[in-house]
Amino acid sequence: MWRPYAKAIRAHFPHIALVYDAFHILAEYSRMLDALRTQEYMRLKGPMKKIIKRTRFLLLQGQEKLSISAKKKLQTLLRINRNLFIAYLLKEELRRLWRFESREEAERFFFGWIRKALNSGIGKLVKLATRLLRHAEGILNYFRYPISTAMVEGINNKIKVIKRKAYGYRDVEYFKLKIYNLHLSRYSLL
C-alpha cells in the first residue's frame, strides 16, 4: 500500500486493477497492534505493566494457534487493557474479511469494520482504518481477482535462506544456480 508503488502501477498499467492481499493488510495491522502494545506498556505503572510485558506474540498470533495457557494469559491482558482488547477483537474480526464469497458481502463487512475502528477512539487504530479506507478499492478488488503474493513471498524467503547459508561465498553464478534449482528441490528450513 505504498503510495509510490500504487502511483507507478496506475501510470504504467492503467488497465490493470490493483489488488492488496490479506498478508500485507494483516502485516500492517500487526505492526500497528505491536506499536499500540508498546504505547500501552509505556503508559502503565506497577503490576499492570508486568502483565503487558512479553505478550507481543499472544496479540499477533491467530486465536486458533494459541495454547490453553497462552489463551489464559491473553485473556488476563485483554481484561486489564481496554485499548488492546478493542484492537485485538478488531484484528480477529478483520481476519474474517477474506472468507467472504462475494465482493458485495465483503464490502458491507469491510465498511462496517472501518466504522467500528474509526469509532474506537484509539489513535493508532483510527490512523490505520483511515489508511485502509483510502485503499478500499484495492483491498476489495481481491474479491474480483482472488490473487495473492504468498507464492512470491515464499520464494523470496527461500532465496534469503540460501543467501544466509552462503554468507561469505563470492560465486554469484553458483548462487544463481541454487535459485534456479528451487523448483526442483525442497529445502529444510531447520
Image: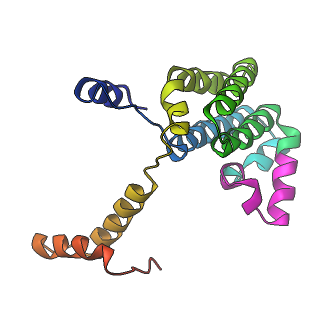
> Residue 63 lies in magenta, yes or no?
yes
Residue 124 point in image, percent of width and height: 62, 26
Residue 68, above or below 148 = below
Q: Which corner quadrant holds the N terminus?
A: top left
| Residue at 70% in and 54% down | 62
Residue 156, above or below 185 = above
| Residue at 83% in and 56% down | 73
| Residue at 65% in and 28% down | 104
Residue 167 visible within the image: no
Residue 101 point in image, percent of width and height: 66, 42
Left or right placement of residue 102 versus residue 141 in this view: right
Residue 76 point in image, percent of width and height: 87, 49
The tally of labels here is: 0
Residue 173 visible within the image: yes
Between residue 145 and residue 35, name the one nearer to us: 145
Residue 188 point in image, percent of width and height: 44, 81
> Residue 95 lies in magenta, yes or no?
no
Between residue 11 and residue 100, name the one nearer to us: 100
| Residue at 57% in and 22% down | 133
Left or right placement of residue 12 versus residue 49 in this view: left
Quadrant of res 172: bottom left
Between residue 50 and residue 130, name the one nearer to us: 130
Left or right placement of residue 34 versus residue 3 in this view: right
Residue 100, above or below 106 = below
Left or right placement of residue 6 versus residue 189 in this view: left
Quadrant of res 13: top left
Residue 147, above or below 43 = below
Q: What stretch is highlighted in magenta?
A: 57-77
The secondary structure that dominates the magenta segment is helix
